[in-house]
Image: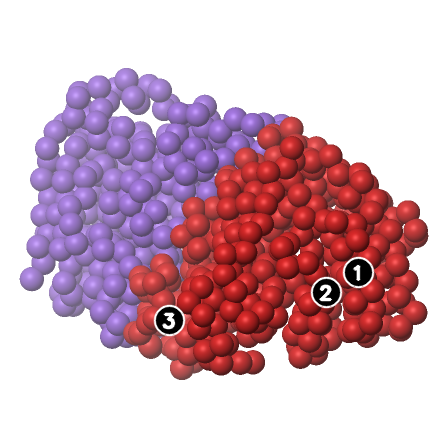
Chain colours: A purple, B red
């Protein structure tokens, strides 16, 4: 039923240039997935996402399950049709959001009970229910429910999480009845031996793609690159590798250098709404006084709507005046920056010049 | 210096089909001006405004004076360039906002002192300073500073306001050194004799266009139509007539029937952000439970982005989830409705079928 496929088209060191095929089209990798938390990438339309260079987006199972509800989305033809995005969609399992709600959730071997952040109502998420929700959303890639402990965590806790993640991965895989592909998730914190064991167990379950979870949860940024590098080496070369929740531009470049193919992060979109913008000359905060009368484009090397149509002075004015247009234009710019960086990485890998690109983006 | 002109191209009863020429292009009248309070029509881009059918927009002198400041906008080439809108712009005088701030402003013959709603700082607006600010903004149509009393008002107060409005209109006219045309404003509340006297005095000052002010300030909706009808009859036929701050779709139709050519109102944009949407079948509030699973377009007769790309269920979801996309799509829809109504009125006047259109839009 699933038309999922992945092929590698070029390599440069450990960096990989690939092509991931889904029922909703092909994704050129390495790829960054803008996050559409509540059935919309905040402030931008599907058409604008395409203009920014997006080839795949991420949907949040936790949020869509609570509101508007996966049955409603199923009855309306699935998430693609509901939100007007015709390209591929990957959905997370909902676990990450639930596990983040310390004190509002209770974990057992079967699953996790939690209270809605919207109305306090009681809900339950299990490997089976997560897969059922993701199948109802009709996402192209569904993620297994994993257990993601916050770092730092005691070694015993990490090991428990790895064991449970393997058991839940099997249950998730066996329960899925949707139109997409299911990816497994490797846990293990920053412990190389645990990561290795988790990778072996998850790969043994034979998923069409693998994610590295449990990163970007409180550890130092150097650890992310190290975990990605170490874990990627234990994943099969012919399957896509997804580093969950990462990250800063320099983190993406370092991870691609380690052989990662897929990323998602709220950073470009959330930072945009907070006025932090990524430019070819570094990060700036548009609200700073220095931009008050600056007639120049935000980034003269960028071709996005914000940079070609408006001055820094105007973008600053929109931001300090709390105009919705600030969120719109800033989001378009930051996504254009992130997705442009991914396109540059893909080109560099194909041309065998990735090392030079990486030098320019050292963290 | 000003290239301002106005010609009538058709009449149907008192309704007029006209053409107003400015340095930034020609406006087909009757026209509705979306309100760009702080240098942006909230939630939409200039390109989208054009798609919605906007031919002219309104800028708020009070807001732009306080933030980012008219000198800054002047130094960056004027409001058109600052906000990326290349069509005509009309600016108000700033008086309406200042007079609305009961207790925060003090009026005398020379002008009005007030405190900023942003930081409480003390400012002063006079006929001369209002014209200076509007000249710095480089708007195509500048409005004289008038005195607009809240209704109900004592007859003595209304008369004083009419007298001062005439004196201030002369001072405004004489002080203006900008690139646009200056419109006079008729006051007089709901008193026909006062309106008549005010119209005579303002027309005597020979402005290229005339506004009817002091409406939509607390009086019943029937009064608006009555004041517009009565006052319009005392304005010269060859000059554009602008009914300030009006209104509901049915108010626009009634006023056009009385010979009004120009309108502005925050209603379509503000209502959009509150979820109240204008459709061919009446007003709806998109947050209502009845739309939860409704797969139909918001208005099947509308060709806007919201109606052609999304379901009512999705628009409701965006609104209840507080997504920025709700404000975007709802604003595009409501502006398309308002500007479509204006286009329909222009066509009906040209075809001599305005009476039939009016019947369909009785309040």
Residue B200: give its label: 1
What's the distance in space between the residues labelled 3 and 2, CA to CA? 42 Å
Q: Secondary structure at mark 1?
A: helix
Chain identity of mark 1 = B
Chain identity of mark 2 = B
Tell me residue B234's x, y (percent).
72, 65
* Marks 2,1: beta carbons within 8 A: yes
Q: Secondary structure at mark 3?
A: loop
Residue at the disc numbered 3: B298
Tell me residue B50's x, y (percent).
44, 50
Residue B234: give its label: 2
Q: Is residue A173 above or below residue A156?
A: below
Chain identity of mark 3 = B
- Residue A255: image quadrant is top left
* Marks 1,3: beta carbons within 8 A: no
Q: Quick one: label 3 or label 2, which is nearer the N terminus? A: 2
Q: Residue at x 49, y 29 (%)?
A: A297
Q: Is residue B98 visible?
A: no
Quadrant that contains the N terminus of chain A = bottom left
Mark 1 neighbour class, 10 Å CA radius: few under 14, some 14 to 19, many 20 or more: some
Tell me residue B21's x, y (percent).
55, 45
What's the distance in space between the residues labelled 1 and 3, CA to CA? 47 Å
């Amino acid at each position: 039923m699933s038309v999922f496929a992945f092929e590698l088209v070029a390599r440069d060191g450990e960096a990989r240039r690939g092509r991931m095929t889904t029922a909703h089209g092909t994704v050129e990798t390495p790829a960054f997935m803008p996050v559409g938390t509540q059935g919309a990438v905040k402030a931008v339309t599907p058409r604008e996402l395409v203009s920014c260079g997006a080839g795949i987006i991420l949907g949040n199972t936790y949020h869509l399950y609570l509101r508007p509800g996966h049955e409603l989305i199923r009855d309306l033809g699935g998430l693609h049709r509901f939100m007007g995005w015709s390209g591929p969609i990957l959905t997370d399992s909902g676990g990450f959001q639930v596990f983040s709600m310390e004190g509002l959730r209770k974990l057992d071997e079967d699953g996790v009970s939690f209270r809605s952040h919207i109305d306090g109502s009681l809900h339950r998420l299990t490997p089976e229910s997560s897969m059922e929700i993701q199948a109802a959303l009709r996402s192209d890639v569904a993620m297994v429910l994993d257990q993601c402990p916050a770092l730092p965590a005691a070694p015993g806790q990490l090991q428990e999480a790895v064991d449970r993640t393997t058991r839940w991965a099997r249950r998730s895989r066996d329960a899925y009845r949707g139109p997409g592909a299911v990816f497994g998730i490797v846990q293990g914190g920053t412990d190389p031996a645990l990561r290795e064991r988790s990778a072996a167990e998850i790969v043994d379950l034979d998923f069409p793609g693998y994610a590295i979870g449990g990163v970007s949860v409180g550890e130092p940024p150097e650890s992310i690159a190290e975990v990605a590098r170490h874990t990627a080496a234990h994943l099969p070369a012919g399957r896509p590798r997804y580093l969950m929740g990462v990250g800063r531009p320099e983190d993406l470049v370092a991870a691609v250098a380690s052989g990662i193919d897929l990323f998602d992060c709220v950073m470009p979109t959330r930072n945009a709404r907070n006025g932090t913008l990524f430019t070819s000359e570094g990060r700036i905060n548009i609200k700073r006084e220095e931009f008050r009368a600056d007639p120049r484009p935000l980034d003269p090397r960028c071709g996005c709507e914000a940079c070609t149509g408006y001055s820094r002075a105007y973008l600053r004015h929109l931001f300090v005046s709390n105009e919705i247009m600030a969120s719109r234009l800033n989001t378009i710019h930051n996504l254009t920056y992130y997705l442009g960086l991914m396109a540059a990485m893909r080109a560099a890998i194909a041309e065998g010049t990735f090392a030079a690109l990486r030098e320019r983006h050292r963290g």
